[in-house]
Image: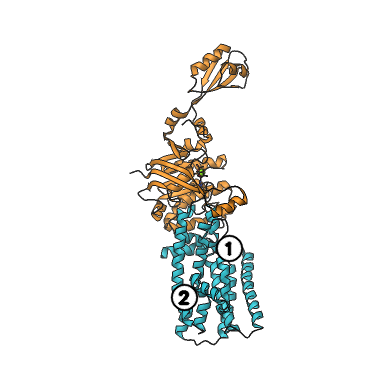
Chain colours: A orange, B cyan
Amino acid sequence: MSLVEARGLTKIFRRPEKDPGLRGSLKHLVQRRFKEFRAVDGIELSIEAGESVAYVGPNGAGKSTTIKLLTGILVPTAGTVRVAGAEPHTDRMVNARNIGVLFGQRTQLWWDLPVRESLALLRDMYDLSPAFYKQRLERLDEVLGLADLLPVVARKLSLGQRMRADLAAALLHQPKIVYLDEPTIGLDISVKDRVRQFLRELREDGTTLMLTTHDLGDIEDVCERIVIIDEGRKIFDGPLAQMKDRFARVRRMHLQLAEPTPAEKLAERLPDVEVIAGDSPTEVTVTFDRFTHTAGQIIAGVLDVVEVGELHLDEPAIEDVVRKVYAGELLR
Amino acid sequence: MRRTLRIYRRSLGAHLRAVLEYEADFWVLIVAGLLFQVLNLIFLSAVFAHVPALNGWSYPEAVLLAGTYGFVNGLGPLFFEGTWRLAGKINHGELDYPLTRPAPVLVQVVSGGIGLHGVGDLIGGGAMIGWGLAHSDIDWSPARIGGALLLLASSATILLSLIVVGNAASFWVGGNHPVFAMTLIRTGDMAKYPLSIYGVAVRATFTVLVPYAFISFFPASWLLDKESAWIGLLTPLVALYCAYLARLVFRHGLRRYDSAGH
Ligand SMILES: Nc1ncnc2c1ncn2[C@@H]1O[C@H](COP(=O)(O)OP(=O)(O)O)[C@@H](O)[C@H]1O
Ligand SMILES: [Mg+2]
């Protein structure tokens, strides 16, 4: 059996249906009406021990809700979850020791306590021995630079510091599987790099990772498998490379022209294609959809207007795919 | 159970250390708590300036009663302050992390803060109890002392349980503030006066429906050998019932928890 197994996982939220204004609110008090909303809809997911999975999709796709279902925070409306053999929302205590959780938007540190006290409380909850605790702190200090943060009260930490301390809190008990919901949100580049480096090391240590992110770098650096969801449904699940082939529709061609030519003139000849002038008047970049045009058609079109000196075709970028995923533009 | 208590103690200890960092606050809070008890006392004195006894309760006895209520009320902020943040936590989805940790959520919630004004209540209430006892006519025996301590512990259990029940109502009521719990606990303030001054409806409600009367009135009645003193001996049973109820309500509430969208 896989480490994580979700079958037909579904979560329906009930939202109050109110007419606007005070009158609507009063009416709602007497006559309660609710609208059902499927945030997660029949997700099938298996994660093997040691895998690292990127879980991506546009805002509101149901990523965080899935994580809350997998961690036992929410009770599924339908379907089943097993994590290391336990059902998270019923075997809470058992499950808790197997997993580490981080929601990038919120901290698990106690707001008015120094980081050191928060970590010590977690040590008590997870029954960590003094020796193990000390060794873990040293290890986490090495990779996250924790020592400086220990005496600081959580509310006084900067975002980057907070995220580092939160990572330490989530990983203190050395969980088998770690769920990270937007672990790099709002961080500047240097902290981001540090966090990614840390996640890579974690993966190399054999920890299973599942992370949601809006950041392509996170995905390319850390994950080998990607799961895409939209409107609560899974629309892709496979290796990163395969996703590129399947969804990377956009191709970019850089052309060196024999004589200066305005981009508009080429655009006239090439409808439905984006033509952008380059640094010099003899350079243009053409961006096209490989499902509607071939590279040959583009070259032929340009040759109708002007001779071409050199050309260069960009590799399909995962960036384009993921950007489209987040813009909700992916073809279904 | 021992493990749970240890986690509770450590968490409370950490918050205590954090609060003690702000020494100025520390004294302000304690004085505030004390002042509240002094106000109680002034009010009682004003009443007794006009009447020698209140439905059979002398001034020292009434002070003992109010002191007991004040003392027990000081335990809430000291030991269960975190409970008052439950509504906000539910509303902001802040039970997410506690639900992923290997410790009871109720314990994590309850120990999530400390209110030092409780110390003022304890000191003020304690002084009133002491003075009241010294000026009342009590037939002391080892059994009476043991009984008094048991009733005090039971009365504390009842109040803390009511705090949990009231705040757990937020799982159903929603909203950012514990309006229901506030109302519930502040209504209980009526129980710091001899219950016999109220009409039958209030007395019945406070005895059966919401057992405020068992927080101070019945235990004190037993100690002072008042009319129907035996009811005071039911206090431990009522306490067990309330503690059970608190656990039950919290558990059911937690099942309704739906986090918050992020
Ligand atoms: N606690 C909740 N109550 C009601 N609706 C919710 C709740 N949590 C999330 N939702 C809704 O479910 C959908 C999915 O949310 P979420 O899983 O947070 O999306 P994502 O993390 O992919 O951006 C959103 O439309 C959101 O508004
Ligand atoms: Mg999210």
**CA distance for labels 2 and 1:** 34 Å
Q: A23 above or below B16?
A: above
Residue A184 percent across, percent down from the top left: 53, 42
Query: Which comes before the other along the chain, label 2 or label 1?
Result: 1
* Picture quadrant of residue A112: bottom right
Can residue B126 be seen here? The reply is no
Q: Residues within 10 Å of mark 2 (few under 14, many from 20)?
A: many
Look at discs 2 and 1 and give the one toward the viewer: 2
Residue B124 percent across, percent down from the top left: 60, 75
Provide the residue designation for mark 2: B235
Q: Are discs 2 and 1 both within one chain?
A: yes
Q: Chain of mark 1?
A: B
Q: State the SS at label 2.
A: helix
Q: Residue furthest left?
A: A1
* Relative depth, front residue between A212 and B13: A212
Q: B56 above or below B32?
A: below
Can residue B177 be seen here? The reply is yes
* Relative depth, front residue between B203 and A58: B203
